[in-house]
Amino acid sequence: MIKEVMSDGIKRMEGALTSLSGDFVRLRTGRASTGLIDHIMVDYYGTPTPINQVASVAVPDSRTITIQPWDKGAFALIDKALLKSDLGLNPVNDGKVIRICIPPLTEERRKELVKVAKKFTEDSKIAIRNVRRDLNDSFKKLEKDKDISEDDLHKSQDDVQKLTDEFIKKCDELFLAKEKEILEI
């Protein structure tokens, strides 16, 4: 019983870390990354479709993303989706390839991005703490139903706290790496 509850908790905490990593990929750092446009959907024949499913996306250098649609009719749709996105970047369409140039970030913008990264990290930590609370509640219920002893309850709660501390430390490590990347000129 205890192992099942713990393995479920570990999966949920890993999910919070994965979500944080995904948020960090979408965070613009002044360096081109295909992750910047992964979340942008193109209205392709009436169906919202990710850009990487209607075109090949590449990063030829550190400041440029190229998008080469497989269907000529998708050029205008991709252009429109990029302009409507929250990136604030202007795509350049030459009829064969769409290029997005990533301008260097200002110092002020870098500090704003660090704050956003910190918020993402804090949200992940909250999610991890919520998992901890759920696990502890599950263990208390098991103890109340006499499925585990009081000693098992305390040992399990200690294990959950160690697990929580470990995942929060991983969140902090991810944040420090992202902060360094953002502030790097």
Image: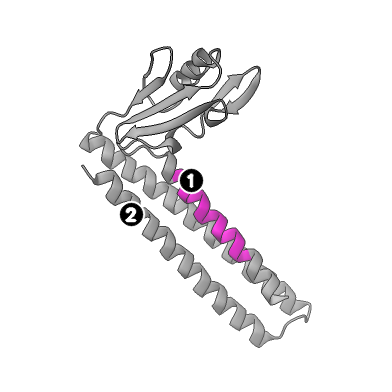
Q: Position of residue 159 (x, y in %)?
A: 56, 77
Q: Which mark is residue 177?
A: 2
Q: Amino acid at mark 2?
A: Ala
Q: Is residue 78 above or below residue 170?
A: above
The residue shown at (51%, 33%) is: 39
How many residues crowd around disc 2 within 10 Å: few (fewer than 14), some, or many (20 or more)? few
Residue 17 location (% of width, % of height)? 50, 55
Q: Residue at image x 22%, y 34%?
A: 106
Which residue is at 31% across, 50% downward? 179
Amino acid type at mark 1:
Gly
Choose between 135 and 9: the one closer to the eye.
9
Which residue, given by chain and number where applicable, does mark 1 sit on?
22
Residue that appears at 20% across and 42% down: 185
Question: Number of labelled discs?
Answer: 2
Answer with the quarter of the image where residue 114 lies: top left
Q: Earlier in the sequence, mark 1 or mark 2?
A: 1
* Residue 89, above or below 75: below
Q: Helix or strand or loop: what does disc 1 sit on?
A: helix
Whether residue 68 is situated above or below residue 160 in the rendered picture: above
Overall secondary structure of the magenta section: helix
Residue range corresponding to the magenta coloring: 9-23
Q: Is residue 7 magenta?
A: no
Taking the magenta stretch, the answer to whether it contains residue 22 is yes
Find residue 165 and report its horizontal and vertical position in percent: 46, 69
Please give left or right for residue 86 compared with residue 45 in the image. left
Question: Can the viewer see residue 130 in this picture?
Answer: no
Look at the numbered disc 2 and give the secondary structure of its residue: helix
**Marks 1/2: CA distance?**
14 Å
Asked if the residue at tag 2 contacts the one at tag 1, i.e. Cβ–Cβ closer than 8 Å, the answer is: no
Quadrant of the image for the N terminus? bottom right
* Residue 97 relative to residue 7: left or right: left
